[in-house]
Each structure stands twice: as C-alpha cells, then as structure tokens.
Amino acid sequence: MRSLNLLRPGLALLLAAGLSTLVTPVGVAHAATATVPAGATPITFTSTEQLAQGVTYGSFQVATPRGVTVGYLLTADLRKNTVSLDLLHPDAVAQRTVVSAMTNEQGAVAGVNGDFFNNSETHAGVTPTYSSSGPEIADGAELKFAVPNAQRFGPGLAPGTSTRDVFGVGVNGKARVDTLSLDGEVRSGKGTIALSGLNQYALPVDGVGLFTAAWGSASRIRSTCGTDTSRSDPCSSHTYEVTVRDGVITAVGQLPGAGAIPADTQVLVGRERGADALDDLTVGDRVQVREKLDSAGKPRLTFAVGGAPILRAGQPLAGLDTKTAAVRSSAGVGPDGRTVYLVVLAGRAPASAGFTIAELADLMRTLGATDAVNLDGGGSSTVAVREPGQAAATARNSPSDGTERAVANGIGIFVGRR
C-alpha cells in the first residue's frame, strides 16, 4: 500500500497493491507529475482494477479522528462511447430490491445504491411505499417527482438545496448535479388544475398528484400523510381520488386506493384544496393530463436520481454536518462532465469509522469531483461489481446490516449499451 497526500481535484491515483503497474483512473493525473499541496488529506489506495475500458474499481483507506475508514471507488469515463450511466430500479417506483440484483437484471457492470426512501412509517395503518424521496428518470422516461423537503428521509439538507436536486446525465452525455421542477396540469371543461406530484409518497398540502402504471400496486394513501413542515403529522382527512382511462373519468372516490394501475389509466389524488378541485369532476368528464419534469440546467436529462448536494463548483456547501459520522455513499462529477466518481464506504467494523457529510464532501473534491451529492447511507450503502470473467455482480462493501438492504434505486455503470 502507498499513502498519497491528496487535496486538489484530479490528483487521485489508484495503486494496485503488490503490482508493479500503476493504474490511473480516467480523468486522474499521476501523482508523481503533480504538485501536491501541504496539509492534504491522506488517502491510501489499496487495490484497483479495470472492469472495462473507461471503468475502474478500487478500494482505499482514510484515517479519521475516529479511526480508519475503508471505502470503494468506481470511476466511469463518459468520453468512451461505450460507457454510460442509468438508473438502477425495480419493476415499480413503489418497490425495492437489492443493488446487486438490479445491477445484474439490467446488465450493468457495476452499481451503487441511490436516493433515500420511504423505508419506515409512523402513521397507524399505513405501510411504507419503499419509493424514493427525490425524482427518478430512467432511460429518458420520467418516473417520479420529489416529496416536500420535510417529508424526506435522511440527514438534513444544506441551505439552498431541496429534494428536487438530482445527479444525472444529459442527452449530451455529460453528468451534472441539477434541480428538477414539475410542469403539469389537468384540463377539463370545468377548468385547469395544477399538478404538484408525480408517483411520489408525499404530496404538498393542498396538492394534486398523478399516479401512473409506473407507481406499481402500493397504496396511494401515504401520499396524503404528513405535511410540508412535518413528516409525522397526521394523514389528511380531506382527500379525493379520480380515475381516468383513455382521457375519460371512470371513477371517483373520497379515499386514495391501491392496486396496479393499467397502462391506459391515470389516477389523480388530491388533499385539502386539491381534493376540492378534483371533487368538481364527475364520471364521464373528458380530461387531458399533462406532466413533464423540467431541469434548471440544459440539455434535457436522460437519467436522474435524487441526491443531496454537498459539493458545488469545487467547494463544499455551507452548513454541512461536521459531527455525525456514518457509513455513506456519494456520486460526483469532474469539471468536464465526463468523469464520474461513485464512492461507497465499508459498512462493518473494524472498517466502519464512517465520515461526516463535510468529510464526504472533502473526499469527493480530493478524488476529482467539482460537484457531488450525498446518497443514502448506513445499511443502504452498497457497491456491486461484476469483474471481467464473472457471470454476475456481487456486493463488495460488507453492508452494515450484514446482508444487502433492499433499496428504491441506484446508479448503474453500463458498457456497450448505447
């Protein structure tokens, strides 16, 4: 092993233990050719290998005040025409499965876990939906939008960030951290109703949400629980649901339902004033439902997963937690938008001293990222890798639950998919 003092982006070197050949990940300069500032963060890279042209995987160690933390790094060079990223996801938004299974089922060479999700529930009689807090876009298809900030699971957000923030890739093949908004409405002869939700487990107070076949069969009642200021507030007692098939209302009711939604059907759920707006519609009315996710940046995103921004333009965000150390995962991108860094920390002792979120931001900057997000951590943190010659990907980081935790989504690295 060799310890490298690293600080500036682009100085990370993966050193294969016991090998005479140094393997440098894409977009990363050889340490011997760079000037390394004093006072940098010591990172010891313990192994590395090339999974495919443009994709590397390795392990590293970092000494913290709490002890040594082991981590795993995937790098992807999106300049290679055969390398791409996309969302790892189960068959439905309101569903969960383990990262290795999603990696194998979708044909990725490697993958990490994604966004925080509705994994537990405090509302009596309401079951978790297991859907993510933030937006999802997979292979260009817009699957879901974001819950209100207060309804999010996970550590607090940095000032100026929200559940609408994502890590994604545009149609130009460049990765970026971006913010999405929902542009949608329901039009009928009785007026226009704005949409404030798409396949999400929590709607804003007074909002109307759209549920499609992508949601799955989970109950839609959770979408009317909690408020914009508290996830644990009671479920709304003032709700309404409208079923639309081929542009015609076929059913209405007071309570949100459950069960699979056919491909030709849309379900609208409203709470408070949103319920009042839907209550004006009746069976037989013709309606047009339109929804689109718009990004603050350009061009359009073909892949997106929710993530909490921690690094922007090469600088850690203000207000990041500096006290709570935990097992964490992160996704970052270099200044060219083509070099992606996916990091997952080991989950079990003695290699689980963990990082604070502020330390995670510093790590991502050291590795070469200029923009990065914090992903779900703890027992959810998982890296799955399929090495050359292996038939299937397996989890490599000894997740802290002892086995892989089923999660809502992840980030997959694909080779030869374009």
Image (tube, rainbow, N blue to C red):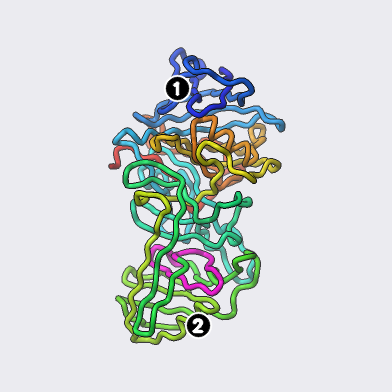
- Looking at the rendered structure, the secondary structure element under dot 1 is loop
- Mark 2 touching mark 1, by CB under 8 A? no
Q: Is residue 311 above or below residue 64?
A: below
Residue 298 tag number: none
Mark identifier at residue 276: 2
Q: Residue at x 53, y 27 (%)?
A: 8
Residue 116: % across, % down? 55, 52
Q: Quadrant of residue 52?
A: top left
Amino acid tagged 2: Asp
**From the viewer's perspective, is residue 404 above or below residue 92?**
above
Question: For mark 2, does the 10 Å Cα neighbourhood hold few (<14), some (14 to 19), or many (20 or more) residues?
Answer: some
The answer to if 201 sits in the magenta stretch is yes
Whole-number angstrom distance, CA of label 2 to CA of label 1: 60 Å
- Residue type at numbered disc 1: Ala
The answer, for residue 305, to whether it is visible in the render is yes
Q: Residue at x 56, y 17 (%)?
A: 2
In the displayed structure, would residue 284 be above or below residue 374? below
Residue at 58%, 70% (x, y): give it. 225
Q: Quadrant of residue 245?
A: bottom left
- Whether residue 395 can be seen here: no
Magenta run includes residue 210: yes
Q: Quadrant of the N terminus?
A: top right
Q: Which residues are magenta?
A: 198-217
- The residue that disc 1 covers is 29
